[in-house]
Image (cartoon, helix red, strand yellow):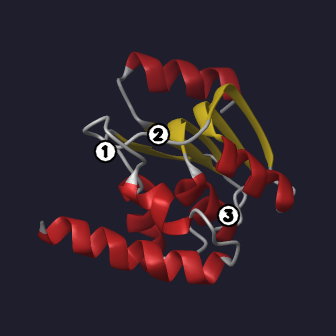
Amino acid sequence: MKLQQLQKKLNEEGLSLIADRQGELYTSKLHGIGPIINPMKEDIYYFEDAIVVDKVIGKATAMLLILSKVKYIYAYVLSEKAKEILEYYHISYDCEKVVPYIINRTHDGMCPMEKTVYDMNDLDEAFIALKHKQSELMKQ
């Protein structure tokens, strides 16, 4: 699918994420890093050569997609740290709005996933840290 078609489908169906994986569509209504990290636990290269359209991309999601060898990312909201890491790894992307950081769900601080990888640049290290953080948050 073309980018405009993916964007239209995302908005019309109330999705949080849509990915064109070489003709196979992957969609999710989940928020946070779940839609990205969950399939990557089974196949680290799940998003290889994919075009991903996401409502919000922080550094955590960006690092996961880079590790998974994504081809292109479109975000409605992108954090400054996500922008930096995408440019560092030469990943093609576009966005509507860049924000200083992704806000947590209670709107009183930084997203815990963004905070987890804020000072990291190693993709494998970030993947391990994010899996641990996701597990920790699910227990709460």
Tell me: 103 left or right of 119.
Answer: left
Given contact means CB atoms under 8 Å apart, are the residues at marks 2 and 1 in contact? yes
Q: Real-space Cα distance between discs 2 and 1?
A: 8 Å
Which secondary structure, mark 3? loop
Please name whichever residue, 49 or 80, is drawn nearer the observer in this view of the structure: 80
Residue for badge 2: 17
Which numbered dot is residue 121?
A: none
Q: Real-space Cα distance between discs 1 and 3?
A: 21 Å
The tag earlier along the polypeptide, 1 or 3, is 1
Given contact means CB atoms under 8 Å apart, are the residues at marks 1 and 3 in contact? no
Q: How packed is label 3: few (under 14 Cα within 10 Å), some, or many (20 or more)? A: some
Tell me which amino acid carries mark 3.
Answer: Glu
Tell me which amino acid carries mark 1.
Answer: Leu
In this rendering, is residue 49 above or below 95? below
The tag earlier along the polypeptide, 3 or 2, is 2
In this rendering, is residue 31 above or below 129? above
Tell me which amino acid carries mark 2.
Answer: Leu
- Location of the N terminus by quadrant is top right
Which secondary structure, mark 1? loop
Which numbered dot is residue 30?
A: 1
Please name whichever residue, 67 or 51, is drawn nearer the observer in this view of the structure: 67
Tell me: 73 left or right of 35.
Answer: right
Which numbered dot is residue 48?
A: 3
- Name the residue at 71% across, 66% down: 69
